[in-house]
Amino acid sequence: MNQAVHSSDPLPISASGAGRTNDPARTMAEILAVATHEFADKGLTGARIDAIAAATRTSKRMIYYYFGSKDGLYLAVLEEAYRRMRAIEADLHLDDLPPVQALQKLVEFTYDHHRDNEDFIRLVMNENIHRGDYLRQSRNIQQLNATAIRAVRDVYERGVKGGVFRSGLEPVDIHSAISAFTFFNVSNRHTFGVIFQTKTSPTKAQTLKREHVVALILRFVSH
């Protein structure tokens, strides 16, 4: 995958008009935003670079200049989705809260993020269809997500030390439990609703209630 160009790099000529090449960072961000929905909605195979170029008023040539290929753009979309989530997560200031309240806030954030970002869930589902082959090519994905485990570890260890959490759990197990409930809430909303005839919101996933997910995780880690 091509690295992002710097302001001093020679800029490509857009086939779709002037004014699209004088701010590479903004152009790349717009391409990533549109491509996120295109890949989430249609998958890697069904997504079309022509559609992304038209929606961003750029050109296929410019997209390939920045991202190298369709696969390169897809990988950049995956990395950006995780980077954006972890950046927001880092601003939760969990260290300022007692362990129970900190874990509750982390679970609530993850629930809200997944519920409000269905494209993220679809991207992850699509990449699992590919068995993680494209994400495995990323040089940054482990580093991008290391903060997630570190945040859980810090909260959990404080809770164990304070006597409110039971010992013997691995941070990755807690993280996976949070992910399992909050991911399922969105990923299975349609099939679950059809099978069990549950009332579903047309815009927001509510397969599992937010407070129930919080309670389940707190009970999992507590004595």
Image (spheres, grey):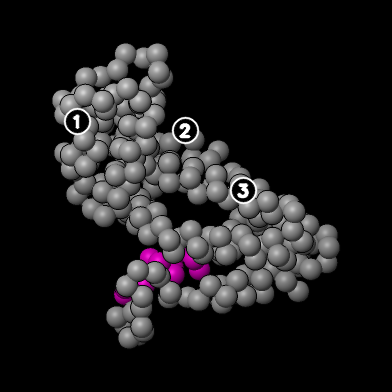
The residue under label 2 is 139
User: Label 1 belongs to which residue?
Assistant: 59
- Residue 72: x and y in percent read 32, 34
Residue drawn where x is 61% and y is 55% of the image: 172
- Secondary structure beneath label 2: loop
Determine if residue 123 is in view: yes
For the residues carrying marks 2 and 3, which lies nearer the camera in this image? 3
| Residue 186 magenta | yes
The circle drawn on residue 202 is none
Using residue 13 as the reference point, say whether residue 223 is left or right of it. Answer: right
* Residue drawn at 31 percent across, 27 percent down: 66
Instruction: Give the SS element for disc 1.
Output: loop
Does residue 72 show up magenta in the picture? no
> Is tag 1's residue or tag 3's residue first in the polypeptide sequence?
1
Seen in the picture, residue 29 relative to 200 is either above or below; the reply is: above
Q: CA distance from mark 2 to mark 3?
A: 24 Å
* Segment colored magenta: 180-191
Residue 220 in the image: x percent, y percent?
65, 71
Q: Nearer the viewer, residue 174 or 212?
A: 212
Q: Residues within 10 Å of mark 2 (few under 14, many from 20)?
A: few
N-terminal label among 2 and 3:
3
Which of the pair 71/26 is nearer the observer? Answer: 26
The answer to whether 42 appears left or right of 159 in the picture is: left
